[in-house]
Image (cartoon, rainbow, N blue to C red):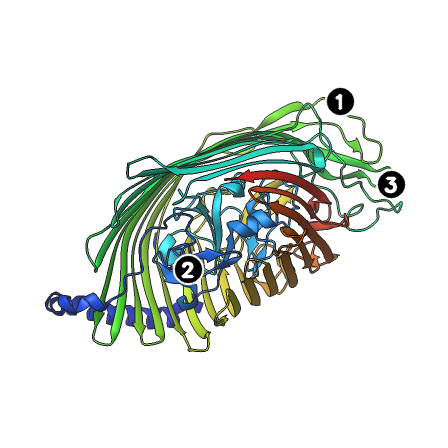
Amino acid sequence: MTVVPSRHRHSARAVQLLLLASVSGLLFGSAAARAQDVIELDTVVVEGGAANGQGTGEGETNEQKGFVAKRSGGATKTNTPLIETPQNVSVVTSDQIEKQELRSIRAATRYTSGVTPEYTGGSDTRFGGFAIRGFDSTANATFQDGPRLPSSSVINFLGLDPYGAERIEILKGPSSVLYGQNGPGGLINYVSKRPTDAPLREFEINGGSFGLLEGRFDVSDQVTDTPFSFRLTGVVRQSENQVDHVDDDRFFIAPVLKWEPDADTSLTILANYQRDRAGFSLQFLPAAGTVFDDVRGRRIPVNRFIGEPDFNDYDTDLGSVGYQFEHRFDEVFTVRQNARYSFLKHDEASVYGAGYADETAGLLNRGAGASDTDLGSFSIDNQVQAEFDTGLFSHTVLGGLDYRRTSYDDLVDIYTTAPLDLYDPVYGAPVDFFGTYYDNHVEQDQTGLYLQDQIRIDRLSIVLSGRYDWATTELQRPDSDFLTAVDAAKDSEAFTGRVGLIYNFDNGFAPYVSYSESFLPPLDVSPANGLFEPEEASQYEAGVKYEVPGMDATITASIFDIVRDNAIRFDAVGGTFQARQTGQIESRGFELEGVASITDNLNMRLAYTYLDVEITEDPDGGNEGKMPTTVPRNTVAAWADYTIRNASIFDGLGVGLGVRYTGSTFGDDANTYKVPSATVFDAALTYTKDNYEIGLNATNLFDKEYVASCGNDSAQCFYAEGRRVTAKASIRW
């Protein structure tokens, strides 16, 4: 089946196809001329190449200093300065992760514009609740070192420990043209740590709230008298959770080996394994008693566990192994191949809220379930890059062919148990097996062919990209106690494109405009009807970037309009999520982000987001014109830290302070009530002497109690995380 483009995209696609055809004619028609003029190519400055060392050096792919990143390999898959990239890209550097003591990928984006990072609360052990530009991106937007990490509504890779990341990149807006299947809001790319040029030894111990005890290490060096270098990063954690009877234990290990026989060739082998042993932290609470008082004027305690301690597991094993190969033949041609196998295994047993049995008595109905989920995915991306001039035009042409195969098994059983008194809980009720809900086996194959030309004409940069995807999704499901058997397959194919222009003025300003598209055949399936139609989205974006002359500081302002067709939403039915495909959602907004590292003393970050998201078509739900749940109209976040560096006794003392405001959100798609806004503060205090550092970090410093979001009023409200204080001591040499 061929996916028909949305009516919103016809004119833009026609323009883009015309531009791509013109560029292709220019490129391939000038092949002979390139061969004759190759002697003139010595004037081309080749900036490409794999990241070296820590990826912080000038001109390197991951160039960054402090909180400020100057380049990204993510937005274009080439080594392009962000100031020359016609797309809003945010980067969270390893320095920011360390300064703010960020403990999850979602937490790492708290001070990033366009992102709603923890709308199910910071203590969510499921790794859920993450949105970009108003669209849920929990399952469709996670990438690692380029390849996608496919996920579903049940399991995802957002739990990867950020200590293993060199940086986290957020590419905003549809990005299928280079990355294939991708959600409408954008993508988040976890860039793994690489071997460093100089020897690195770091050991750290952490302790703090909820019984936290954690050790970390990071070691890197060259293998003596060989072209090999390595890096090994690890985390061991024992902890409880804000919610009673919930653990949050972790083991993480990430070895990296790099072979670099010469300046033109490199092979980096990367692997990671993470083992999480936790409980079910999301309690699925009603709005009465959380967002507002219940009929007796009471509020449910933030730490209230409504499950059963003996039926409470949320165990996840995830990991990957892959390689990145690059070879530059000459000043024109470079080839790359990135391959990765990733896996995720999840076992769960949980009891959750299912609406009041008697609100006056504080008696809550409970549902229960157990699941066994396995996902495995292999991805490979082959690239050829050519850099050359044709007259006044400088070109960086990238062609690629990628392939991914994903296998996904999901078994869900339903259990029953007795209601619980929310204000005087007594545990120990039997949890009885009721029946198998479904036993799904899903396989998906995706092949994509893409071409991109980055054209430089003096100060004007033009990006023209096109891609064609072919995907096949198969579902096999036997009869269960609740659902009938399904044996179905769906073929999908689509063209996606991007066109962007950015002009770099000498004073540091760079205005830009762009148009981009996305295509996503989902892994999620309907309990009743099987396979869904692919989601599609298109975006118009315009903005201006400003790189402050002579200073490590950048400011980006952007406006955007995204239309998402065949949107998949998740409804809570009896305390369980069920996927359904609705019509269309439109997201329009404004983003402002500034980041600065002024010398080694001062780091600052500011982010503001305005979102106007509307359900424009909803044939089944009847909520046209309404705003979806969990989407705040306004969010603001600001952070600054200062370190004293002089000869006084205060030399090495650092202080940081942050504030985060999240506007109110609607608690249901009918927009009948709102979840109030909230403002919280974060703080940091550090002292560094020689190779030693001690620190104290606090998030939600004043322990504000508030609801992060609701999906309906009966059984889908989630408390935000309260105050978390972490002390650490580390040594580096």
Which residue is tagged 2? 71
Q: Earlier in the sequence, mark 2 or mark 1?
A: 2
Q: Is residue 504 above or below residue 228?
A: below
Q: Earlier in the sequence, mark 3 or mark 1?
A: 3
Position in image of residue 74 (x %, y %): 40, 55
Q: Earlier in the sequence, mark 3 or mark 2?
A: 2
- Front disc: 3 or 1: 1
Q: CA distance from mark 2 to mark 1?
A: 56 Å
Horizontal side of 147 relative to 452 (left or right) equals right
Q: Is residue 214 above or below residue 299?
A: above
Which residue appears at 35% of the width and 75% of the height? 460
Toward which corner of the image does residue 5 lie, by quadrant? bottom left
Which residue appears at 61% of the width and 43% of the height? 693
Which residue appears at 74% of the width and 34% of the height? 305
Q: CA distance from mark 3 to mark 1?
A: 23 Å
Residue 292 in sight in this render: yes
10 Å crowding of disc 2: few (<14), some (14-19), many (20+): many
Q: Which mark is residue 360?
A: 3
Callout 3: SS:
loop
Q: Is residue 300 above or below residue 347?
A: below
Horizontal side of 641 relative to 186 (left or right) equals right
Position in image of residue 604 (x %, y %): 60, 61
Which residue appears at 65% of the width and 47% of the height? 686
Which residue is tagged 1? 428
Callout 1: SS:
loop
10 Å crowding of disc 3: few (<14), some (14-19), many (20+): few
Q: Please report contact status of discs 3 and 1: CB closer than 8 Å, yes or no.
A: no
